Each structure stands twice: as structure tokens, then as C-alpha cells.
Amino acid sequence: MPKAARGPRLELYGPDRRHGARPKRGFSRYCYYIVWYEGVRRRERSCGTAVLGEAQARLAEVIGELARALQAKGPRPPERMMIAEAIALYAEQHGPHAAAPERIAHAGSALLDWWGEATIAEITPQACRRYVEERKAQIATG
């Protein structure tokens, strides 16, 4: 199981290990970098300083920028995303690559009949049990 991302953090890079720095080839001075991951890709941004207080201020700015970017394009809160949107995204992105795309379309149709007007936040164990019972009844009656 992969480790959870730790979020943006400061790392001190330098020519050697003094001051707890991480040695970097070609570095002649010490400098703080902000390091974070986007998915599995490691990202780094220089703070341009070896002064911890200045680097921490820059880190706060970068965290704010990343949060705004995520909010603008990223996941919405579950109470603001319709299940129909999630099903459509799944069918659009996964369907063409599936072994049997028609099965995804058929399953999506059945899911939309039940969940289509609900939000992601409305998915509960009780609602899932009700859905299963209703689907079993539909299948049994043909």
C-alpha cells in the first residue's frame, strides 16, 4: 500500500550534509526548497534563501497557492457533486478501455435510475442496502 502524501514541506539543500542539508551536486551554497508530490510526481520549488524564517513564509505562500489551485480545479465537497456526474466521468474515462464497454453503460443506466438525483454525500451503507434490495426485486420480476 502506498504511503500517504505528507504535503508541501521544506528541505535544505547544499553542497554537503552540514546543517542537516541534503547534498546536491553543483550546489555551492545552502538553499531551502519546497518539496511536494502531485500524484507520484515529485515537485520542487526554490525559496531562494537559506534563512529559515524567510523559507517558512514562502512555504505558507506556496501552500495557499496550491490550495487555491486545488479548489479551483480539484475535487468538490461530496455534498456538491452529483452521483450522475461521477457515473458519467467513470463511463467516459474508463468505458473505452474496458473489456466490455456495453456492460459499463448498462450498469451505469441502472445506477442512474436509483442514484441519479443524489449527491455523493448521500451514499450511506443504508442507502446502498436499499439499492441492492430494489435491484434484486427488479431482476427477480424481470
Image (tube, rainbow, N blue to C red):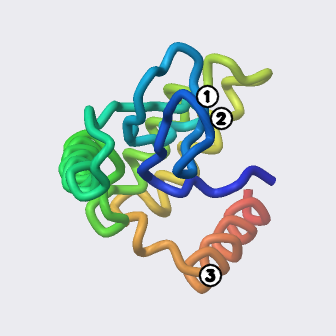
* Residue sitting nearer the eye, 32 or 14: 14
Instruction: Tell me, for residue 6, which label it has, or none.
Output: none
Image coordinates of residue 139 in percent, x first then y, are: 74, 60
Query: Which residue is located at x 60 percent, y 33 percent?
Result: 16
> What amino acid type is highlighted by mark number 2?
Ile
Place residue 1 in its image quadrant.
bottom right
Residue occupied by mark 3: 125
Q: How many marks?
A: 3
Mark found first going from the N terminus, 3 or 1 = 1
Query: Which residue is located at x 62 percent, y 81 percent?
Result: 125
Q: Is residue 39 visible?
A: yes
Mark found first going from the N terminus, 2 or 1 = 1
Residue occupied by mark 1: 94
Query: Which residue is located at x 71 percent, y 71 percent?
Result: 137
Q: Is residue 22 left or right of residue 53?
A: right
Give neighbour class at mark 3: few <14, some 14-19, many 20+ (Cα, 10 Å): few
> What amino acid type is highlighted by mark number 3?
Pro
**Secondary structure type for disc 1:** helix
